[in-house]
Amino acid sequence: MSTAEIGLYRSQKLALRYFTAAVILFGVMILFGFLSSLYYLHPSMLFKVFDFNTSKMLHIDTLVIWLLMALMGSIYWFLPKEIGGEIAGIRFAEIMFWAFCVIVAIVAVVFIFVQYGHADEFSLWFINQGRKYLEAPRWASLGIVAVLLTFSYNVIGSAIKRRKMTGILWVLCLDLIPLVLVYTDAFAAQTNMSVDLYWWWWIVHMWVESTWEVLIGCIMAMMLMEIAGTSRRIVETWLYIEVMLVLGAGILGLGHHYFWIGTPEYWLSIGGFFSALEPLPLLGMVVHAIYDAGSHHLKNTNTPAFWWITAEAFGNFIGAGVWGFMMTLPQINLFSHGTQWTVSHGHFAFYGAYVCGVIAVFYLARQKYTGIEHLHGKGWWWGFGLLNFGMLGMVMALLLAGMAQAFYGRAIGGSTLMAFTDASQNAWFVAGMWARTGFGVVFALGYVALVWDLLAIRKRLPQAAAVSSPEPA
Amino acid sequence: MDIQEPGFWRAGAISTTAVMIVVLIFLSINSSQAIAVGGSHVPDYSVINRQIGYRYDWTRREDVPVIGGPQPLFGKVYNEGQATALMNRAKLVIQSRNCINCHTFFGNGAYYGPDLTKSWLDPAWHQIFMPMTGAKTQEEAMVMFLMDPPKYPTWDRRMPNLHLSEQDAQAVVAYLKWMSAVDTNGFPANFGMQGEKP
Amino acid sequence: MSPEAVLYSAGLCGLLTLAAFGYGAFYVGSKMLAVKLIYGAHGCYFIVAALAILIFLSTPLGIGWKILIVASAVVYAAVPPVTWRFLVKLHAPEEQHS
C-alpha cells in the first residue's frame, strides 16, 4: 500500500480501481471507434475476418461500460464523505468489481473470436444477443444485474446503517430503482420488432437520458460541496430543480424515439414537443455553470477539473440542445433519423453530458489521492484541448456526412439500396468520413495526453506528500 | 413556501416525475395495443401471404403500407401458426447474426448497411438481384443473396457470409416482407418512389 | 418536405438554439465580467428572434411546430435573467455569512 492510499476509505480505493478500468475501456472504445471509421474508407479491410458489425459493437458497448464504471466509481468515491464513514458491504463491492472486469473480458473475447452463433437460444445466452447496446449474452447481463444490485445495496445499505438520509442520498437511492428495473429488458427476445424496440428504448433512453443524468447530477452536487464548499442547501435545491427538469422533459422525451417504430401517431406530437423544450432548461444550466465558475474557488484548487466541468455544461447544451433540436422535429427527423447526422448528435451529446463530467471527477480523485492541495500545471491542457478539438471536428464531419445522406439518400433518393449507395459515394459524404477519421486521430492523441497527465500527477507526489492531509479524503 | 428552500423544489421534482410516469404508463398501455401483432399499426404475421405496397396517403399526409390481394411467399400460403414460427426463427437469425450492428430496422441500429424497414419493397431486388442470381422470383433472389452475399456484390461495401441455412434465409425474407407492412408513420419517406409524389 | 427545405429548416433550428446559447453566455458574462457584454447578449437575442420569425415565415414546418418555436424564442428571453436572479437569491444567505 502506498503512503497516499493510507488516507483513503476502502470505498475510495475501490473507486480508483473503477476509474482505472474505466480509463482503460475508454481507450478500447476509441480504438474500436477508429477501426470502425476505417471500414468506411477501406470497405475490404479485414473482410470475413473481423467485420464492421463486431468492431462497431465493441465501440458502443465499451462506451456504455466505461461510463457506467466511471459513474459507479464516482459514487463510491463521494459516498463515504456523504454518509460520514465506510460504506456498507464494501467487501461485496470489491468482489463484484473483479467479477465485473472478468465478465467484460470474457464477453470481449467471445465477441472478437466467436462473433456470432446459430439462430438459437444458446447464442443469446452465451455469444451475442444482437440488440444494439445490449449485445452482451444473457449470462453476462445477469452478471451486470448482480453488479448493479450490489451497487444499490452499497448505497441504500450505507444510508440505513449510518441512519443518515440527505437529500442527495434520497435522490440517489430512488434513482437506483429505475436504473436496475429497466435493465431487466436486457434479456428479452421479442419476435415483433416494434415491441422489441419499444421496450429497448425504455432501457436505452431511461439510462442515458434519465437515470444517468440524475446520477451525474448527484455526483456533481457532492463534488461541488467537497471542492467548492458550496452549502448543502444550495446543491440540494439545484439537484431537485435538475431532477424536475430532466425527468419532466426526459420521461416523455422518450417519445422522440417512437416516431417511426410502428407506434401511434400521437408520439410525433408528444416526442417533438418534449424534446423541443429540452434546450430551455439546458440554457438555465449553462447560466448556473458560469455562475458557479465565477463565484466559487474551484479554479484555485483544481484547474483541470474546473475546465472539464465548464466544458460539460457547454458540451451538454451544444451536443444535446443544439444538435438535438436541429433534428428532433418529426418533419426533419423523418430524413435525418438513422443517418450519420444521428451519429454526430450521439457523439456530441454523450461527450458533453457524461465524458467531460467524469474526467473532472478523475482529476479530482487524482488530486485527493496524491494529496496535492492545488492542482494546476499545464500538462492537462493537451488532453483538454485535443479531446475537445477532436470531438468538435468529428461531430462537424459527421454532420456534413449525415446531411449529405439525408439530402441525397433520403429526401431525393427515397432510402432504397441504390439511394443509400449513391449517397454513401457522394463527395460530401466521403469528405465527411475522411475528416471524421482525421479528427478521430486527434481525439485519440487527446486520450493519450489525458492519461499521460493523470499519471504524471503521481510523479509530483514526493513534493506534494509534505502538504497532504492524513485524514481520509 | 419559499423558492429558496429545497423543500419547494423537492415537492416539484416528486410531483413532476410522478405525473410524467403515470402519463407514460397510460401511453404505453395504449401503444402496446397498437404495436401488438394484429394491432392498428402492426399486421398479423400471415400478411406475408398478401401483396404489400407503399403509397402516399393524402389524408394522413404521409406514406402508408397498402395491403393488397393474395401473393403467396415461396409459392406457399402460411397459416398464422406457420407464419409465427417462421417469424420466431427469423428474429433469432437477426439477433444471433448481429444484423443491427450494420443495418437499421425502423431507422435504429448501425448505418454501415442500408435501412431494412421497407427492404422487401426495394426495386433493387427486381432490377439488380434477380438478373444477377438468375432467380425467377424476388424471394428466391433474396434467399440466394442472403445465403452467400459476397457472391453478389453491388458496390465495394460488401455483406459478409453469415452462414445462413436455406430455412434461415427464407425466414428472414418472410420477416422483411412482414416488416414492410408495419405502419411506421411514413418512415422512410418516398421509398422507391423517386420523383413520383410531393 | 423538399430536400432543400429539410436542410434549410434544420439549419435554422440549430442556429436559433446556438444563438440562444450565445445570449445566455453573454448575459451571465455581462453580470460577472463586464457590463458591456450585455450588447453581445442583445445581439444574440436579436438573432434568436429573427430566426424564429424566419422559421415561421419561410419553412414548411407544421403550424404547431412554428408556434412552439416562436413561443420558445420568447421563453429564451426570460431564462438567463430569471435563472440569474434565482441563483443570486439562492446564494444570498451564504454570501452574507462569508
Image (cartoon, helix red, strand yellow):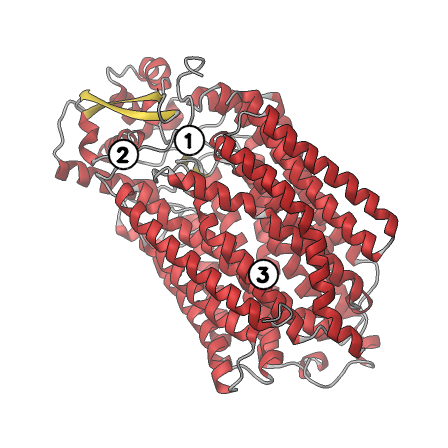
Residue B83 horizontal side relative to residue A177, left or right: left
Chain ID for label 3?
Answer: A
Instruction: Tell me the residue at 61%/45% (across/down).
Output: A321
Cα–Cα span, label 2 and label 3: 43 Å
Q: SS class of the residue under badge 3?
A: helix
Cα–Cα span, label 1 and label 3: 37 Å
Marks 1, 3: nearer the viewer: 3
For residue A167, say whether it is visible: yes
* Residue at mark 2: B175
- Residue type, numbered disc 2: Tyr
The x and y percentages for residue A455 are 72, 64
- Residue type, numbered disc 1: Asp
Q: Quadrant of residue A259?
A: top left
* Residue at mark 3: A242
- Residue type, numbered disc 3: Glu
Q: Quadrant of residue A379?
A: bottom right
Q: Is residue A94 above or below residue A302?
A: below
Q: Are marks 2 and 3 on the same chain?
A: no
Residue B96 horizontal side relative to residue A332, left or right: left
For residue A447, say whether it is visible: no
Q: Nearer the viewer, residue B189 or B126?
A: B189
Q: SS class of the residue under badge 2?
A: helix
Q: Which mark, residue B115? A: 1
Do the CB atoms of the residues marked 1 and 3 lie less than 8 Å apart? no
Q: Looking at the image, how many numbered discs can be counted on the residues?
A: 3
